[in-house]
Image (spheres, grey):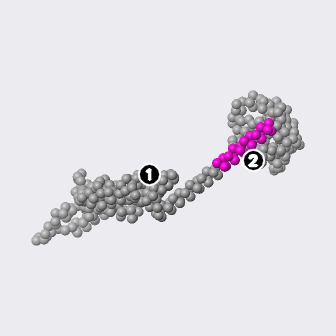
Amino acid sequence: MDETNQDRVVSEWERRKYLPKSGEPDLPPQISQFANKTTDEVMEELNRLPFFMTKLDETDGEGGENVGVEALKSLAYDGEPHEIATNFKTQGNDCYKAKQYTHAIEYYTKALEVDCGVDDITKSLYLNRAACNLELKNYRRCIDDCKRVLLIDEKNIKACFRAAKAFDAIGDLQEAKQIISYGLTFADNNKDLKQLLSSIERKELDEKNRKIAREKRENEIRMQKSILNDSIKLRHIAIVKTKSPPEMLKEAKIKLEDPVDYQSQLIFPALILYPTIDEFDFIAEISELSTPLEILELIFNRPQEWFEKHPNFRIKTLDCFMETASGGLVKVGKKIEINQALMNDSPKAPLFDNALKLFVVPKQEVADWVSKWSKDLALENRVD
């Protein structure tokens, strides 16, 4: 507010304030204290009076306590212990009906702190607080309150039901069933307990079926893995791991076309490398019965521009090689099935990182490329 507007407000306040004339009564002391105060100051003073209070102010504005508020607080504890506890319980019940569960818990807790000594009141307070904690998903606290109820009233059906609900919510189905069974010993026709028991038994059955299905699947996976390992051994296929496999091979898997038939075709990825032009192709799945020729016919189905850029790359003028277990190279005929090269014991050409590694080089460049091949470098990249 600028100075002009502030002066205008002050002038208006001065014009309106009560000034007793001759023979007129003075303002009462309670009101006269506001005579020379601004509107904001008056509102601040009024807010310290419980009747006008819009927010809790426990001070008197001068560093002391708010006598009015303290007086109201003392009223809450005015009466016999059971009356005080009942008063807090009533306020808690009002909050519960309004779904203000946190506030309700505060009132029930205050009532319990009074320690009125009346079992019926104490029991209902714990029971009501358990209901609030159940709504707020404070399941352990709900269970604790229900236990306290049962220590007072061992046949309290509500305590059994709420504790069972809480145990069910945290997945402790056995505890939930035990307390339901206990409740049914003295309330065998209780509808709520029976419905909850049926619900828990359905959950147990579902979990049992899930466990059976999970174990069955795990057994199938173990069996298929065993069949796969046996089929690789029977074929005399070696697998070598490298220290830094290409990204696309980090999750590479070998599988059988039929997972439970070790005689079915092996399926694995293939990495086709063109070392003289520093390029490669990746095929996610090929059969062990594929030939290099079939692989080349598949991947060389590409635009003519690529062949114009690489004129030496014609299928008829290409040679194929595989790296051997000893770090050398072995030439592979383009019409020979891949598994023949893999199953050959000498020289041994393994799979690398569960994938076929096939080098493709133009015939006129083979001699130069082979002369630069380093066995030591090849072996250095392998995992011992």
Question: At 82% across and 30% down in the image, what residue appears?
Answer: 371
Reading the image, the residue beneath label 1 is 140
Q: What secondary structure predominates along the stretch shown in magenta?
A: helix
The answer, for residue 25, to whether it is visible in the render is: yes
Q: SS class of the residue under badge 2?
A: loop
Give the number of callouts: 2
Point out residue 194 in the picture as x, y percentages from the top left corner: 50, 61
Residue at image location 21% in from the left, 62% down from the top: 34
Residue drawn at 31 percent across, 64 percent down: 5
Residue at 22% x, 66% y is 14
* Residue 310, quarter of the rendered image: top right
Residue 69 spot, x, y in % from top left:
25, 58
Q: Nearer the viewer, residue 113 or 316?
A: 113
Q: Give the quadrant of residue 81.
A: bottom left
Q: Amino acid at mark 1?
A: Arg
Q: Secondary structure at mark 1?
A: helix
Q: Where is 87 relative to 300, above or below?
A: below
Query: Does the magenta run of residues contain 151?
Result: no
Q: Which residues are magenta?
A: 215-236
Residue 252 location, x and y as percent? 71, 43
Residue ID for mark 2? 259
* Amino acid type shown at disc 2: Pro
Q: Quadrant of the N terminus?
A: bottom left
Q: In screen coordinates, is 303 left or right of 10?
A: right
Q: In this image, 305 relative to 116: left or right?
A: right
Which image quarter is the C terminus in?
top right
Mark 1 / mark 2, whichever is N-terminal: 1
Residue closer to the observer: 245 or 342 = 342
